[in-house]
Image: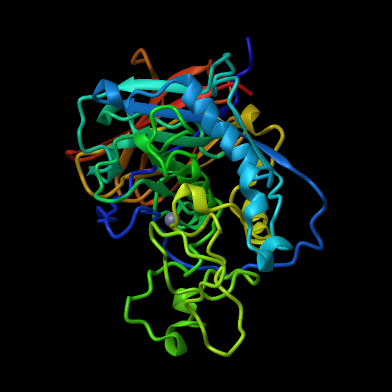
Amino acid sequence: MRAPSNIFILSSLLLIPFFTLAQNWCGAVHQSEIAVAQSMEDRPKMEITIPVVVHNVWRTEDQQISLEQVQSQIDVLNEDFRALNADVGDVHFPFQSRVADMEINFVLATEDPMGQPHSGFIQRQTNESNLTGFLGGRRKLCYDDLGGSTAWCTACYLNIWVAELDLEQVAGIGIFPTDIASGEVPAAEDGVYIQTDRFGRGGELEAPYDLGRTCTHEIGHYLNLFHLWGANTPPFDCIPSECCGDSAYDDFVDDTPFQISTYLGECPGVGANSCVITPGDETDNVQNFMGLSPDNCIFMFTEGQKARVWEALQTYRTGLLAADCLKSCMVSSETEAPRSNDLMLVRQQGTGLLYTETLSPRVHWELFSGDGKQISTGYQEFPGEVRINYQNLPTGLYFLRARQGDDWQVTKLLIARN
Ligand SMILES: [Zn+2]
């Protein structure tokens, strides 16, 4: 038996408004830009392999996907992120020298967070038809109890949800690491969400969106890449002299030229240039994965994008770089509360020590086991830190209940392997 010594906290309840993401087929949300260094020179040569868990949440049988389809998507990712895609040779000449091998591999997880063998593929039937909607500040898609599928430890796994996204013209959403770091999106919802009929390669998918590039693109967002025109879609009547070069429409990557056209659904030719500022300036990188052209017209990431991605990995997604991440990363905690304000937050895990914080005065708290046995309890007159020792507790499910008068809040904790 493995010694229990870690509690992983996956969610803190945040009330986030429901975004209407219906402007284009990619509904990635993002909050803020943080400037990053673009130099790759001080980074040692390395590559990583990210364990992936795919959650197929389906309501009707046509929303079910096969393991074969899942594997076809993993194959696409391993091609696109290593510049091994068969169509990379079609990159227009000016950009051929900028094609990047991102040095990122993907593999279906072979064990679950409890250390048990697993296929890395979860299928879950639901009655919920509005999975991308929110209930109590939680996106339904990402929680078992709301009709979705609860993430595996998002610090260590890339969670991909495949479902009917029920957002008009949105085929995928990728969560930016900055949105997790800022708390804008709970860690329990970290990952990418892909529309069922855009996931994988071939099978029953319809051309030209049958090559798995929606997922490649959304993982680009998950790794902190913006669209080529930045975080905001430039207005149609944008004048190049005003919009090109405006930081509002910049992707903060050095080697992708300014671009203000999305080319949504189009495959522009080699000379396409939406930012003609000076005669003879660079054409748009229309074949980049971070554009919105169909699957059969996007073939590459650039070296500049690679630099930005690795900076993000080293800043925000360090769990994906840690060889032993899964040893200390545990499943979920979920907080339920019939109120808009949290009483008690789990701040961080320690080895055998849970760091929590009460946010209101006069909070009673108690930790009890899955079978209802009280383990420890306390009272906080004033808001502040509470440390709870769990070093000698066996592996299993626990609950932390905070109470203040008639208000209460329960956080579900899973103590798992070391
Ligand atoms: Zn996008």
The residue closer to the viewer here, 143 or 126, is 126
Residue 273: x and y in percent read 51, 76
Residue sitting at 50 percent across and 54 percent down?
Answer: 181
Which residue of the protein is positioned furthest toward the left in this rendering? Answer: 406
Q: Is residue 29 at least partly visible in the picture?
A: yes
Q: How many marks?
A: 0
Residue at 39% x, 50% y is: 185
Is any atom of residue 402 visible in this view?
no
When the figure is inspected, residue 391 is found, relative to residue 265, above or below; the finding is: above
Q: Residue at x 48, y 35 (%)?
A: 159
Residue 302 relative to residue 252: left or right = right
Q: Which one is in front, 320 or 283?
A: 283
Query: Is 267 drawn above or below residue 158 in the view shown?
Result: below
> In the rendering, at what x and y percent does residue 318 appear?
64, 46
Q: 231 or 68: which is nearer to us? A: 68
What colouring style does the render use? rainbow
The vertical placement of 67 against 362, above or below, is above
Q: Quadrant of the N terminus?
A: top right
Residue 385 x %, y %: 46, 47
Q: Quadrant of ligand 1?
A: bottom left
- Residue 136 sits in quarter: top left
Residue drawn at the location 62% of the way across and 56% of the way down: 301
Tell me if residue 110 comes above or below residue 232 in the rendering.
above
Measuring from the top left, give residue 329's x and y in whole percent: 58, 31
Q: Nearer the viewer, residue 202 or 381?
A: 202
Q: Is residue 172 left or right of residue 275?
A: left
Position of the C terminus by quadrant? top right
